[in-house]
Image (tube, rainbow, N blue to C red):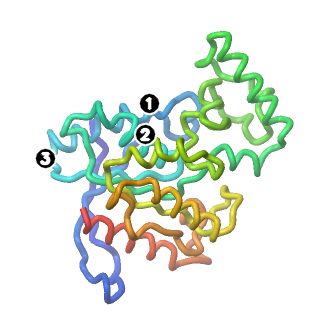
């Protein structure tokens, strides 16, 4: 069964340069990797489920256009879907655009947030498990860094998140040009890139993140990276710090609306 949907008009009047109030149908994809299950899933599994949903939306619900909006790991899902699966998708499985809200490097977030000795130990343990054909086995919680002992994570998923070139390593600042060419240059789908200005999981200043957005967009084919991409002003990772930053939510909705109108 597909998730329930509702139609929502935009909840406020936008700036003079953007006055339209179109109606969109919003579906929340509750994947099998939701919540603590992320640790024994993969981008491949996520995107196979997204693929089934997109097919259902087009063939059963007769949706003419479908746009994926991913948050955090959902950003990796969106890019994986439109690059790794690109040549496998039939017309009813393709999407018209993707929105990346809160794209962050899990690897760099780990470096800034956990004990490095513990991190290196966990990577060594996971590597040995993969070498011993135990990539889908859960790492002993005692071998995980502090803060990661409460959720099961397989050896494969940990290496995907924590090592350079892992399957989840899309947004790290130290990726070489050839890797970025594969990720961003392989996109044929319009993309809106929206990191948060005050993302607590990003170890870089806003100007540095803006430079990364420009670098990523520079590898895209002409017309693929949206001109409306940019930092969500004052926002944290989830854009839920509305008590101190009410304008971030408004800015996000406006940019998403502008992007959707271009598709």
Disc 2: which residue:
80
Q: Tag 3: Cα neighbours inside 10 Å, few (<14), some, or many (≥20)?
A: few
Q: Quadrant of residue 26?
A: bottom left
* In this picture, residue 4 sits left or right of residue 116: left
Residue 36 coordinates in the image, percent (x, y): 58, 37
159 or 20, which lies in front? 159
Q: Is residue 224 above or below residue 241?
A: above
Q: Is label 1 in contact with label 2 (beta carbons under 8 Å)?
A: yes
Residue 228 coordinates in the image, percent (x, y): 40, 70
Q: Quadrant of the N terminus?
A: top left
Q: Element type at marker 1?
A: helix
Per the model, the C-alpha gap separating discs 2 and 3 is 24 Å
Question: Looking at the image, which residue is at 53% across and 69% down?
Answer: 231
- Of circles 1 and 2, the one toward us is 2
- Of circles 2 and 3, the one toward us is 2
Mark 2 or mark 3: which comes first in sequence? 3
Residue 44's disc is 1
Per the model, the C-alpha gap separating discs 1 and 3 is 26 Å
């Amino acid at each position: 069964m597909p998730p329930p949907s509702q139609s929502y008009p935009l909840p406020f009047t936008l700036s003079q340069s953007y006055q339209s109030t179109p109606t969109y149908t919003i579906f929340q994809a509750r994947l099998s990797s939701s919540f603590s299950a992320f640790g024994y899933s993969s981008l491949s599994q996520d995107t196979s489920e997204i693929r089934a949903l997109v097919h259902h939306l087009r063939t059963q619900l007769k949706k003419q256009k479908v746009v994926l909006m991913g948050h955090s790991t959902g950003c990796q899902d969106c890019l994986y879907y439109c690059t790794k699966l690109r040549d496998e998708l039939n017309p009813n499985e393709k999407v018209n655009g993707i929105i990346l809200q809160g794209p962050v490097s899990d690897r760099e977030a780990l470096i800034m947030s956990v004990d490095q000795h513990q991190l290196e130990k966990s990577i060594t343990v996971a590597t040995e498990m993969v070498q011993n054909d135990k990539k889908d086995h859960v790492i002993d919680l005692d071998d995980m860094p502090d803060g990661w002992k409460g959720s099961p994570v397989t050896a494969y998923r940990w290496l995907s998140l924590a090592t350079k070139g892992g399957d989840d390593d899309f947004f790290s600042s130290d990726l070489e040009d050839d890797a970025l060419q594969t990720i961003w240059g392989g996109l044929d789908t319009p993309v809106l890139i929206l990191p948060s200005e005050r993302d607590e999981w990003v170890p870089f200043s806003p100007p540095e993140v803006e430079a990364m957005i420009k670098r990523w967009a520079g590898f895209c084919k002409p017309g693929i990276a949206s001109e409306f991409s940019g930092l969500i002003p004052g926002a944290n990772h989830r854009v839920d710090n509305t008590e101190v930053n009410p304008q971030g939510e408004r800015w996000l909705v406006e940019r998403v609306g502008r992007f959707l109108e271009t598709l």
